[in-house]
Image (cartoon, helix red, strand yellow):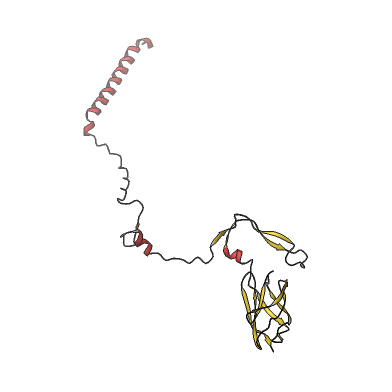
Amino acid sequence: MIRSRQLWPLGLAIGVLAGLAGAIALWWTLLRADDLDIPAPPPQPLLQAARKGPAMTLYAENGAQLTKAAAQAKTAAVPVTDPLIRVAENLYVGHRADGTTFPGSGRKLKFAKDTIIPRSKLDACFPAAIVTTISPANGPAAGGTQVTIKGANFTPGSTVTFGGTAATGVTVVDESTIRCTTPAEDAGAADVAVTTDADTVTKTGAFTYA
């Protein structure tokens, strides 16, 4: 009967032989490394070479490089019909709670300081005046007829002319009513013009001098 302590020399010998065989195999592989067909790693993509020439430039559709003047010649100006404006201080709109006081006895903030708005928003606060009727519509050439002008969008300080001559005693009652006295004029039909903060509106032949 073989005892286990008698087998250890045999195991030791087998282990030494196995290690020696592995070392020999590794040494032989290294010797033949030059003959092995080891695939190379795939090439990395190359960065595209930077375009030579000015870094900031323009090219035409056909590829021709453009000078600044040539590039400007390929553009067209766009008219600015409603430019942006900056409000320099708080602007208020008149406020009449009871609808009777003219101009307004109170005010409400319309545009805050440093607000940037289209100019059309500011202009919209000054709508064009409208003249609808003149009553009475006739009077003596010597003038002196008290008339009432009805319309819309009249502003404080509005002025009135008859045939180009300024009326007297002009009173802007409210946005829709002006009272004044006619000046002397030649006989015939005369244009009546009302000038407000926004513009001048004319009603042709609205008053007849006799």
* Picture layout, residue 2 above or below residue 171: above
Q: Can residue 7 be seen in this view?
A: no
Q: In this view, does 10 lie to the left or right of 206?
A: left
Q: Image quarter for residue 111?
A: bottom right
Q: In this view, does 191 lie to the left or right of 139?
A: left
Which residue is nearer to you in this view: 120 or 134?
134
Q: Image quarter for residue 147?
A: bottom right
Q: Can residue 132 be seen in this view?
A: yes
Pinpoint residue 80: horizontal percent, then vertical percent.
50, 65
Which residue is nearer to you in this view: 45 or 160?
160
Which residue is nearer to you in this view: 197 or 145?
145
Q: Is residue 128 left or right of residue 30?
A: right
Pinpoint residue 149: horizontal percent, then vertical percent.
71, 78
Pinpoint residue 105: horizontal percent, then vertical percent.
75, 62
Q: Quadrant of the N terminus?
A: top left
Q: Quadrant of the C terminus?
A: bottom right
User: For the point 25% across and 23% down, which residue is it?
Assistant: 24
User: For the point 35% across and 61% down, which residue is it?
Assistant: 69
Which residue is nearer to you in this view: 65 or 172?
172
